[in-house]
Image (cartoon, rainbow, N blue to C red):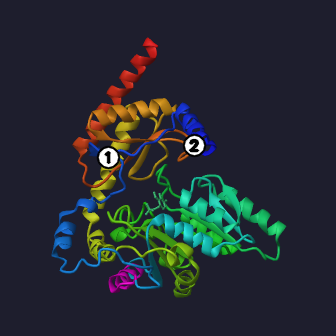
Amino acid sequence: MSRHWQEIQKKLDSIKEKQLFRETKTYHGIDFCSNDYLGLATNSRMMEYYHSLSNVYPFGSTASRLVRGNYDSMDLFENEFASFVEGEAALLVSNGFVANFGLIDSIAAPDCYVFTDRLNHASILDGIRISGAKKKYYNHLDLNHLESLLRKADVDDPQKKQKRIVVTESLFSMDGDSPDFPTLLKLKEEYGFVLVVDEAHALGVYGKEGKGILFRDLPKESIQSIDYRVYTLGKSFGLEGGIIVTKQIGRDHLVNVMRPFIFSTAPLPIISKLAIYALELVRSMDDLRYHLHSLAEGLKVLLRSNGFSITNTASHIIPLLLPTETEALFYAKRLQELGLDVRAIRPPTVPTPRLRISLNAKLATSDTNSLVLALVQIRNEWNGLQIRN
Ligand SMILES: Cc1ncc(COP(=O)(O)O)c(C=O)c1O
């Protein structure tokens, strides 16, 4: 084996030793792990709409959006989405990862400070890294810590020659919790930073018509003062795509400098057609949102009363904490065998191992009850194994 492949083998051996090896596997069992929160990926009205489309060609967009890959449906979707979330302009890109990564790389530079929640998504952290900006982590949701870092930056650079950018998710996908937005907006007023908020997991699920957590927690004027909002079509829209909502000049700037937008083939044209229809459905799904939230509240109560430890979640994402990777893998494997699709999430994705239970509106109370029964059974099995060993 050449030196390169020996190094790769060594890395994989070390990953396996730590119980962190991952594999791609086709899913089986009831969905407790996807991000298809409203069930739109298999919604019958979406399917009917898809079959009613008379022109689904070309399949591929054939070029980047700046060459031959722009379609009327993309422009139309961007306009409708911007008006839905009451922003000036929207930019559709391939996915949410590209949206965060490309956006942050485009607005940050080595002479900037970027303040990031310690648990922000990899696409945000990688965007900061590639931009060369000075990365300042603040403790998860700890706005006092953020303020102390902002104050320190003002002492180090009183003329504010270096731009300050703050980035946060509105709903943390691995913990299910959210920042205190009114306080964050007060800090923005006081310290004058550029603010980026990623609504990936909140779109479609929170706020009136599913507009997101910002609409649940803030008045309109405050939302409009947020410089950039990032959304994805890959979660509650059941599709694929990323959207950046900003001012018109913000969009013009990105179209001219954002590398993954400029140097990559545009999304499939059909995605924007389906997204226009999905947007209509999402807006009308308040009943499903209500069902999802009551399902989540019921499951949290049941898990806690059965002695399971869950994060301080305030959402439909309910991470169940387990002490070791081995235990998390055991639970996930047994749940799969019982027909319940729950996945173990391990470092480096998260700092500590857990089962990420994410609920969707297609589930019924009987499903969440079955999940709790199975978890209790698996806990007994695990405890039995520990006694025997
Ligand atoms: C908070 C957050 N932002 C962005 C993304 C990336 O979105 P996408 O899956 O559309 O690439 C994810 C994906 O899981 C995410 O959790």
Report the residue at 39% width, 70% height from top. Answer: 211
* Segment colored magenta: 69-82
The CA distance from mark 1 to mark 2 is 27 Å
Q: Residues within 10 Å of mark 2 (few under 14, many from 20)?
A: few
Determine which of the numbered discs, if any, sits on residue 5 in the image.
2
Report the residue at 52% width, 72% height from top. Answer: 260
Q: Nearer the viewer, mark 1 or mark 2?
A: 2
User: Residue 18's x, y, as percent?
Assistant: 55, 33
Relative to 181, say whether 370 is above or below.
above
- Residue 226 in view (yes/no): no
Which secondary structure lies at badge 1?
loop
Report the residue at 42% width, 80% height from top. Answer: 82
**Is 75 one of the magenta-colored residues?**
yes
Q: Residues within 10 Å of mark 1 (few under 14, many from 20)?
A: few
User: Residue 21's x, y, as percent?
Assistant: 49, 38
Relative to 134, 77 lies left or right: left
Report the residue at 32% width, 45% height from top. Answer: 298
Please name the residue that numbered disc 1 is placed on: 26
